[in-house]
Image: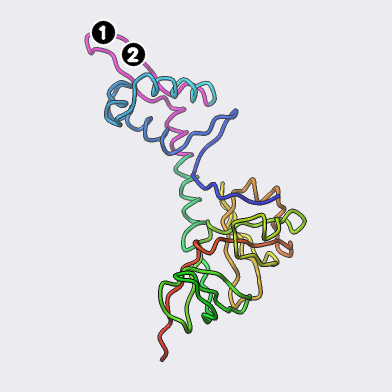
């Protein structure tokens, strides 16, 4: 079992997920006063927008109050349920941003081999393959947390069966949870832990808690290096 990066904020109910695209549609309906105008303002098909509103209402309840005809020509406005749903999404998004902020790992090392822009860098954790456009001495590597995959050691694929060239065994050092996303720090023997972003569902399935042994993997192309100037 492994974690898979899937970090868009959403609110789920009855198998339906309200995401940022749906939020934009509801807010446009609120601003424009009708579903047709909202769809037009977003450059979307009216029929598709209408179907999506129906799908959301089947899962979350009445979201749009539609008024037909009359002297004012009818229109649409959001219900209290929709307003509460948008507020919930904003809280989820804020939680997501708080967990993902500054989520990257920095490793220091020395280039020991090179194949074009791809270099092999000796670090405290071991050898790391990374994109290092120039420089053959000391470098600093940066790895985004959303490019890191965590896997149960028993399920980790062999090097011949994965495109992730960098693989290290480690131990979970800490977990910072949000409403949908968790930031996991894994000790792989470097000066600082490797950070990984996983969904809360993945964290629970993999039982990611301090002390848990995992395999950390990431592609060479997801790791960027820059030369470190000598003092």
The single residue placed furthest to the top in the displayed view is 70
The image shows residue 173, relative to residue 52, as above or below, that is below
Q: Which residue is mark 2?
A: 67
In the rendered image, residue 96, in percent from the top left (x then y), is placed at: 50, 51
Circles 1 and 2, Cβ within 8 Å, touching? The answer is yes
Q: CA distance from mark 1 to mark 2?
A: 8 Å
**Which residue occupies 28% across, 26% down?**
40
Give the magenta part as a residue range: 60-88
**Which residue occupies 30% across, 17% down?**
75
- Please identify the quarter of the rendering in which residue 217 is found: bottom right
Q: Residue 78 colored magenta?
A: yes
In the rendered image, residue 81, in percent from the top left (x then y), is placed at: 47, 27
Residue 33 is marked as none
The image shows residue 182, relative to residue 127, as above or below, that is above
In the rendered image, residue 184, in percent from the top left (x then y), is placed at: 61, 60
**Which residue occupies 69% across, 49% down?**
204
Q: Which residue is mark 1?
A: 70
In the rendered image, residue 33, in percent from the top left (x then y), is placed at: 29, 24
């Amino acid at each position: 079992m492994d974690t898979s990066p899937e970090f868009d904020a959403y609110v789920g109910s009855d198998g339906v997920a309200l995401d940022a695209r749906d939020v934009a549609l509801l807010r446009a309906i609120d601003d424009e006063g009708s579903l047709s105008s909202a769809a037009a303002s977003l450059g979307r098909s009216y029929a598709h927008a209408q179907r999506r509103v129906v799908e959301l209402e089947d899962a979350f309840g009445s979201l749009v109050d539609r008024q037909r005809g009359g002297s004012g020509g009818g229109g649409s406005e959001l219900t209290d349920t929709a307003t509460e749903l948008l507020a919930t999404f904003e809280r989820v998004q804020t939680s997501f941003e708080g967990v993902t902020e500054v989520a990257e790992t920095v490793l220091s090392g020395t280039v020991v081999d090179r194949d074009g822009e791809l270099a092999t860098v000796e670090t405290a954790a071991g050898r790391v393959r990374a994109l290092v456009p120039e420089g053959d001495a000391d470098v600093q590597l940066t790895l985004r947390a959303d490019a890191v995959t965590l896997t149960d050691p028993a399920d980790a694929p062999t090097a011949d069966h994965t495109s992730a060239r960098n693989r290290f065994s480690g131990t979970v050092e800490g977990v910072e949870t949000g409403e949908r996303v968790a930031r996991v720090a894994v000790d792989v023997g470097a000066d600082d832990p490797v950070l990984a972003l996983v969904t809360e569902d993945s964290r629970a399935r993999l039982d990611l808690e301090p002390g848990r042994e995992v395999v950390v993997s990431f592609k060479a192309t997801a790791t960027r290096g820059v030369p470190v100037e000598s003092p």
